[in-house]
Amino acid sequence: MDFLRIAPIETARLSLVPLAVEYAREMAEVLSDPALHAFIGGAPHSAEALHARYERLVAGSPDPSVTWWNWVIRLREEGRLAGTVQATVADSERGPVAEVAWVVGTPWQGHGVATEAARGLVAWLPERDVRVVRAHVHPEHHASAAVARAAGLTPTGL
């Protein structure tokens, strides 16, 4: 899937910028609230741990049939990072399938940032021949379910 290249994505207020290791320190602060892990488990990463994680993500998937696309969400007006979006794209019989996710730091939640970022990502994926987009949302995470719906995704019951 080498033909599938990540690119910046622009929306009305946001720039989705391809992930780079140098964002680790700022993102460690953005993602430092333990409440962000209520539905996914785990705990916030230190800047050093996030740096190591970003090195692995930027290096790409070790599986040649899977592509990892990761972006940081930059608020253009504020000039700062506010979260991440990602798409894991895998080959399938029907063509590339993407599993998407988003995380927005607590201070920016409730302001449409996740919705705008998810919409931008979901709209960009067909430009890369992705026809199936999925998001795994915890059944109790109503805010994330609302983001998924606003991005055009529908519940499957699976």
Image (spheres, rainbow, N blue to C red):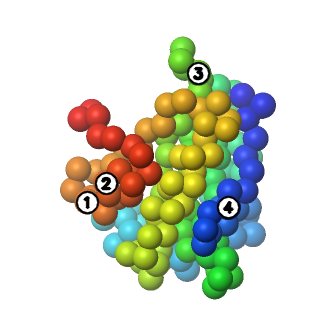
Q: Which residue is mark 1?
A: 142
| Image marks 1 and 4: residues in contact by CB distance under 8 Å | no
Q: Which mark is residue 22?
A: none
Amino acid type at mark 3: Gly
Distance between mark 1 and mark 3 Cα atoms: 30 Å
Residue at x 78%, y 31% (from the top left corner): 3
- For the view shown, which residue lies furthest in the front direction? 12
Where does the image place residue 65, in percent across and percent down from the top left? 64, 25
Q: Which mark's residue is nearer the viewer, 1 or 4?
A: 4
Where does the image place residue 69, in percent across and percent down from the top left? 64, 46
**Residue closest to the eye, 37 or 69:** 69
In terms of sequence position, does the residue under pointer 4 or pointer 3 come before the other?
4
Quarter holding residue 78: bottom right
Question: Does dot 2 land on a helix, a strand or a loop?
Answer: helix
Question: Does dot 1 land on a helix, a strand or a loop?
Answer: helix
In terms of sequence position, does the residue under pointer 1 or pointer 4 come before the other?
4
Residue at x 23%, y 50% (from the top left corner): 139
- 101 relative position to 39: left or right: right
Please rate how many residues cluster around mark 1, counting C-alpha atoms within 10 Å: few if below 14, some from 14 to 19, many from 20: few
In terms of sequence position, does the residue under pointer 3 or pointer 2 come before the other?
3
| Image marks 1 and 2: residues in contact by CB distance under 8 Å | yes
Where does the image place residue 130, in percent across and percent down from the top left? 59, 32
Q: Which mark's residue is nearer the viewer, 4 or 3?
A: 4
Distance between mark 1 and mark 4 Cα atoms: 26 Å
| Image marks 2 and 4: residues in contact by CB distance under 8 Å | no
In terms of sequence position, does the residue under pointer 1 or pointer 3 come before the other?
3
| Image marks 4 and 3: residues in contact by CB distance under 8 Å | no
Q: Which mark is residue 95?
A: 3
Q: Which residue is mark 2?
A: 145
Question: Does dot 3 land on a helix, a strand or a loop?
Answer: loop
Q: Which mark is residue 10?
A: 4
For residue 71, say whether it is visible: yes
